[in-house]
Amino acid sequence: GYCRIFTEMGESYLSLILSHEEMNQQSLVELVLRCSAIPDKEIAGITLHFWYRFVIGLEDLEPYEYRQIRIDSFAPQLIRLLSICTHLLRYPAGVDDLSPDRIDDIEGVRFYFADTIEDCCRLLGGEIVLRNTGDQLQEECRRVTSLPQERQLSDWHGIEAFLYAIQAISMYVPSDETQMIPFVMNLIPQLPTQVPLLRATACLTVGKYAAWLGLHPESLQPLLPYLARGLSIPKCASASAVAIREVCERCQCLGDAVLQLYDGIVAAREQHRGSNSGGDEFVLDLKNELEVLEGVCKAISHKLKDDPSMSPDIISGYINRLAQPVIGGLKAMAPPENPASPKQISSEISRLTVLVQHLRLPRPSPQLAPGVLNRSDFILSLMQETWSILDAVSQKYPRDFNCAEKLCRLHKHALRECGAAHYTPMLEPLIEQIVKKFSQSFLSPYIYLSSVCICEYGRVPAHSQQMYDMVAKISSTVFYAFRGTDDFIANPDVVEEFFFMASKMVYYCPGPLIQSNLLNSMLQCAAVGMKLHHRDANRGTLNFLESLVSYGLKLRSKPSLDVVEQANREALERTIYVEGQPLVANLAQSLLGDLPLYRLDSGSGSIAGVLFFLNKLCPDLLMQWIQPPLMSAPDHAKNVFLGSLANQVDRDDFNSSVRKFTSVCERSRKRQGNTGEDSGNTR
């Protein structure tokens, strides 16, 4: 109780603590600091918000000279706060016997204490904090070393806490630091190997200081085997995998070493798959394997970039060592008789996606040596080689959402990494796949992939009709499936992605859609979709409507239009005239509270946004359509709101008017509800 009182007092008097006038402020800060030192972490954690505000308050002081004076005056307390927080980072005794949920709770508390240590860096500087923490780490190492051998293994908690603190401040430590970081990197391979939590923190520390290791490659030699061995220990496999990826990103000299490591992972996985152990579990968890594979791809990319004279045969050798195991795995799963599970198929597709994303061969350019494979050609050849295989494996489970999502993610990255121009030979078969697989599965990832195609090719006039044909076929499937409101309710993700796809058409290649009857059907569909009690489906619908109306306003405001734009404008205004009234009625009912009100005045699709642009585009029609459904609204609020429409106020004022109107309507509904309850009680 006292801890909370003193902390809240410190927060209340923070302006006085930081003021120019001397009022013995140190005493109050000292009082909160003593509360932070309470051994009970839950109680000590109460003070952390004070320290957060204290740091921000000191940072905001002006001028700089005065700020530094105040920081210096509080430096002794901040140094002690570092020691206190580091001590509170320690795992409790017997942590290995705790449940995973309890360990997660402990990690959450440690995160907040580490945040406070990081805040101290903002005031004291990374070097001071590192030196202070490093000195304590060295002292702790000497203490543990002096213990009898049998006690050293059980007394690791202090060393782990200091390492955790050191990795937390990595972004504040300069890459040319020459005292503490060398000591830490030399210490890590000597730590006990039988303590998984200590090893996990050590691995994370290696990863966080990958930039330092990139400038000191001599320290890497003992660390890479240490990280590799950690992959086989369940409690530190994730930390090891992340550290390997981070080291590969920042260090230029690891290509062959980490590729050899990944060869071992692949061999172990294949051996496990071929054994009688069965199941979908591999030697290394897929998430961790993908982290390592990403790191290997980046390391090989560094190697190829640093040696532009490397022969094409050697480059192909590196690529094949990474790609062939994945292609081989997909080929093995393709035959109908192979009982591969959806999880196994998704795993191989995920590995292929990592190759496409992170194996960064040189971009196509005239300066590239003849015969050297560039990134676009590599991705194109990889997708052409695996196209029929991917089709075969995806047909095994056509309605599995995870498989569809992984496949669409692969196609998205292949298209974007290759570049739209180079990927054009695959566009027609890709569209055919999207349309066919969506009609078979009715899964939203395929609509999302169609949106990606529109973003990449929609602005190219040669492809605009192709994009429209794809959208028309997808729309036909959607309209056939959505026979009633229940169908909309059962598939909110399809509703969301369908209208985002329509928005992309309006933004990138509006002509074919706006001049077709398909737009009328989409607006009729939107009139139902915007009634769904589903936040994302509502967002997609409103995004489409706002994009459509704002496009019409853009055409209206242009001083001159070409023939196509004039046709677009006329077609769009005709369509709004025919289909607009039920849409406006829905928007009005949302303002009244009778329909969902998830997005009142947000960006990228909102009720206020649609009404604002409609009021600019066709004010008389909007006023005619919106007044009847607002008859039940409180008169004064309704008149003010309609007045903002009639006066065509700016967007900020209109948003404010909409918010006030909905607030009044909500209060009115509550009063009516309470009145109804009172009447019922009276009866």
Image: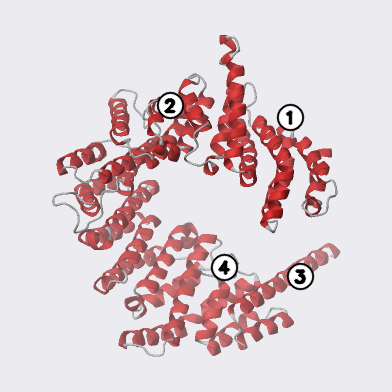
Closer mark to the observer between disc 4 and disc 3: 4
Q: Quadrant of residue 525 in the image?
A: bottom left
Residue drawn at point x = 69 percent, y = 83 percent: 640
Residue drawn at point x = 71 percent, y = 54 percent: 66
Residue drawn at point x = 47 percent, y = 29 percent: 185
Residue identified by numbered label 2? 230
Q: Nearer the viewer, residue 378 or 679?
A: 378
Q: Is residue 333 above or below residue 522?
A: above
Residue identified by numbered label 3? 672
Q: Position of residue 502 (x, y in %)?
A: 40, 69
Residue identified by numbered label 1? 39
Q: Is residue 106 above or below residue 484?
A: above
Q: Nearer the viewer, residue 216 or 668?
A: 216
Residue identified by numbered label 4? 602
First in sequence, mark 1 or 4: give its number. 1
- Badge 3, how many Cα within 10 Å: few under 14, some, many 20+? few
* Disc 4 element: loop
- Badge 4, how many Cα within 10 Å: few under 14, some, many 20+? few
* Disc 3 element: helix
Q: Nearer the viewer, residue 400 or 226?
A: 226
First in sequence, mark 2 or 4: give its number. 2
Distance, label 1 to label 4, CA atoms, is 46 Å
* Amino acid at pointer 3: Gln
* Amino acid at pointer 4: Ser
